Image (cartoon, helix red, strand yellow):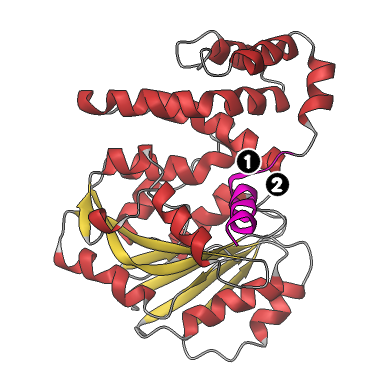
Amino acid sequence: MPRVSICIPTYKRPDLLKVAVNSCLTQTFQDFEIVISDDSPDLHTQDVVRNLSASQPIAYWRNTPGLGQAKNVNRLFNLASGEFLVLLHDDNFLTPNALADLMVPLRENISVVASFGKQYLVTHDGTILDRESTALNERYSKTEDRANKIQRPEWSVLVAQFPPDGYMVRNTAAQETLYRDSPDVGDACDADFGFRLTKLGKFFLVGKYVSAYRMTRESISSKGLRTALSHLYFLVQDLPVPEDLKPLQNKRLRELAPVAVNGCLLRAARRKALGILTSRNYPWHQQFVKGVVQLGMVFAPKAASKLLMIPRNTHHSRLLRMKRKQG
């Protein structure tokens, strides 16, 4: 039985998947298996996996028809046989010492259920963006003062420190938690997984870069981001947290509220959009004009549909603009 199972869900990205798998095969820690679950409608990914020269076992499963994000990840979690599990998206990759670094806190402290580290931000072709990587990690509280320490799990998920992939988790905890395939969760199923994982133990931040987040065309999709954040808003709202973390929870809800309204309107959830706008979480004193516009869109769905389909810049697009301004 391998010590670690690296689980890679994939969909129509054979070239990037090859990079992800190669980053696994070059790990300094070599007691692992790779498990791939493929939702692609064609055989290109299957051909790439077959042609890989692997030093470690690779188990490949093709799903016909595709399972969708949540069920695809759950299939991987259930197939994994290692003591520890790493989830890796097919467009990202691991640093060479990732497995070794992530395993240490899990082996040394039984109360730690998951470990994660810093992430590089890279372009589609894999070029590391140093300044943007620093900004990304600071934004998500992966800073030197918190490095190599146990993190309070509820705090960690509220500040979005727990990442969507590139983490290591105890296999038993992953299989107990699983992803939820529910309309109430939608594309925020990775964040929801982290929220529910907080019930099982503590988190640990490794003070090293362990993975890279690649900015593909899909990752810069504005519509998908806004609909996911609309689901995230309600997950944060329903998250049970200790009393001393209530102010942080409310702050997070105020940050999410404006974009969550747009996400609700995009998925025709006008009643939910109105609920956010009329709640104490909407920052009317800061976003009055935007709030008035959004309120109008609640009662004019056709106009809302046209306006909201105009592309918006995501966080990573803003980081790129920052780089050009600083360069």
Q: Quadrant of residue 272?
A: top right
Residue 45 visible in the snapshot? yes
Q: Which residue is mark 1?
A: 225
Q: Residue at x 69, y 55 (%)?
A: 66
Please tell me how crowded label 2 is: few (under 14), some (14-19), or many (20+) other residues with Cα within 10 Å. some
Check the picture and name the quadrant holding the C terminus. bottom right
> Which of these two is toward me, 280 or 173?
280
Q: Secondary structure at mark 2?
A: loop
Query: What is the quadrant of residue 80 in the picture?
Result: bottom left
Is residue 193 toward the left or the right of residue 155 in the image? Answer: right
In the rendered structure, the answer to whether residue 39 lies left or right of residue 71 reads right
Q: Magenta segment range?
A: 312-327
Q: Are marks 2 and 1 in contact (CB under 8 Å)?
A: yes
Question: Residue 74, image x and y in percent?
Answer: 50, 53
Q: Looking at the picture, does residue 200 appear above or below residue 128?
A: above
Report helix, strand or loop for mark 1: helix
Residue 20 appears at what percent x and percent y?
56, 74
Q: Nearer the viewer, residue 99 or 37?
A: 99
- Which residue shows up at 70% across the image and 22% down it? 265
Left or right, 165 with respect to 242, comes to: right
Residue ID at (42%, 29%): 252
Quadrant in which the N terminus appears: bottom left
Question: Crowding near pointer 1: few (<14 within 10 Å), some, many (20+)?
Answer: some
Q: Give the percent coordinates (x, y) of residue 133.
A: 48, 61
> Amino acid type of disc 2?
Ser
Question: Which amino acid, mark 1?
Answer: Leu
Give the alpha-carbon distance from disc 2 to disc 1, as whole Å. 6 Å
Which label is found at residue 221? 2
Write down the quadrant of residue 45 in the picture: bottom right
